[in-house]
Image (tube, rainbow, N blue to C red):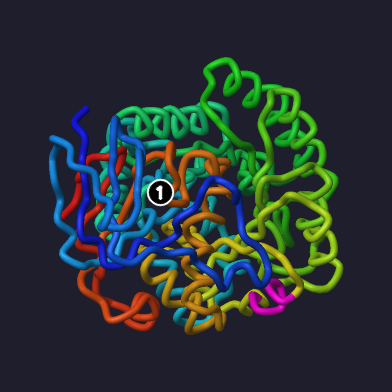
Amino acid sequence: MSNLLIKNIGQLYQIDKGERNLVRGSEMADIPSLKDAYLLIKDGNIADFGPMSVVPNINCEILNAGGKTILPAWCDSHTHIVFPATREEEFIDKIKGLTYEEIAKRGGGILNSAKRMETCSEEDLFQAAMLRLDEMVKWGTGAVEIKSGYGLNTTQEIKMLRVIKRLKAESPVTIKSTFLGAHAIPADFKNNRDGYVTSIIEEMLPQIASEELADFVDVFCDKGFFTIEETGKILEAAAGYGLRPKIHANELGFTGGVQIGVKHNALSVDHLEYIGDKEIDALKKSNTMPVILPGAAFFLRMPLSPARKMITAGLPLALATDFNPGSSPSGNMQWIISMGSILYRMLPEEVINAVTINGAYAMGLEKELGTITIGKRANLVMLKPIPSIAYLPYTFGENKVETVILNGKIVSV
């Protein structure tokens, strides 16, 4: 692997000595940076960085940044990009006034995707997901977590997870895989919820573990989906296979999803449209990352998670796309960055921390990605000329990323 020296960087953001795994509360308003900098990449990792006044004289490939800004590539810690088909017909239903729950009750939503999954081949799933990944990279994403959950039986869930495993092997993007068999109760088990939970625990989990198909386990613990008791059973069983939880929580109400996630040492709890003092207190006593998904709240016209209240209370915060066909059909992290500031009133620095260092933490990648740190993987974005870092969330609709570097190689320009 060739070495790369990037010279004449106008601003190098999110520099770190390896002392931070995440940032929380008031710390989120600060991003350490260096003006007029260089950055050296060796064997796919960050080998050195510093001011141009001490740039090393070495024989390697040179990239002249020409005064442009460089940051860590975005870390998107919540996606569902392996799916069989889009669901724009349900989009029309939403326009006509049907709610997410109403669409789900009549066989739409997740159950719609599960039905289509049965006739979609692994190859077709892979090719479609790879196209989505390639598009996400163009907007600056360098790491994603991908969930199963549109199979809802052993055969189809395993099929999805095998696709994710292949994506890991063939894409330059850093990928984490999450088993989300508990995404919804399938139609065949409508009157036998316990039977489906048993199927997850006794059939799916053992096979997933034997094939090493998942890094994490997830449960949609919310109103109309899985109860606290069901969630606890699944998480306890998954822990026996070394799968740490990442929970869909409090999207549809105050359902206790945050608290059950904290109880089981969840790496993250995601959605969080309904967050109060009890949830905040539980999170403050934990190592769990709260993750807000602005795309889903926007698309479904749901209440906005109280980001400012959470940050003021001293919590860390990550943002992710929730890219999926039913409630957030976009993997554009720059749009998420803009919504973080426009809708959730987060400062530009807070938003950038939420999609870099904290996003990496929410995937268990804080030792590998999320900051400009010697020894970490060289996943970087170089922006087009911008007047200030505030310009990143200030403008939306245009791609402000000029160059993407993944594993030390330029993959998109």
For the residue marked with disc 1, what is the amino acid?
Ile
Residue at the extreme front: 53
Judged left or right of residue 309, residue 41 is left
Residue at the extreme top: 210
The percent position of residue 114, horizontal first and vertical second, equals: 49, 44
Label 1: how many Cα within 10 Å (few below 14, some 14–19, many 20+): many
Main SS of the magenta part reads: helix
Q: Residue at x 24, y 56 (%)?
A: 138
Number of labels in the image equals 1
Q: Residue at x 61, y 44 (%)?
A: 186
**Quadrant showing the C terminus:** bottom left
Q: Is residue 118 above or below residue 190?
A: above
Q: Is residue 402 visible?
A: yes
Query: From which residue to which does the magenta span run?
Result: 307-312
Judged left or right of residue 21, residue 71 is left
Write down the residue under mark 1. Answer: 81
Q: Is residue 387 above or below residue 83?
A: below
The percent position of residue 383, horizontal first and vertical second, equals: 25, 65
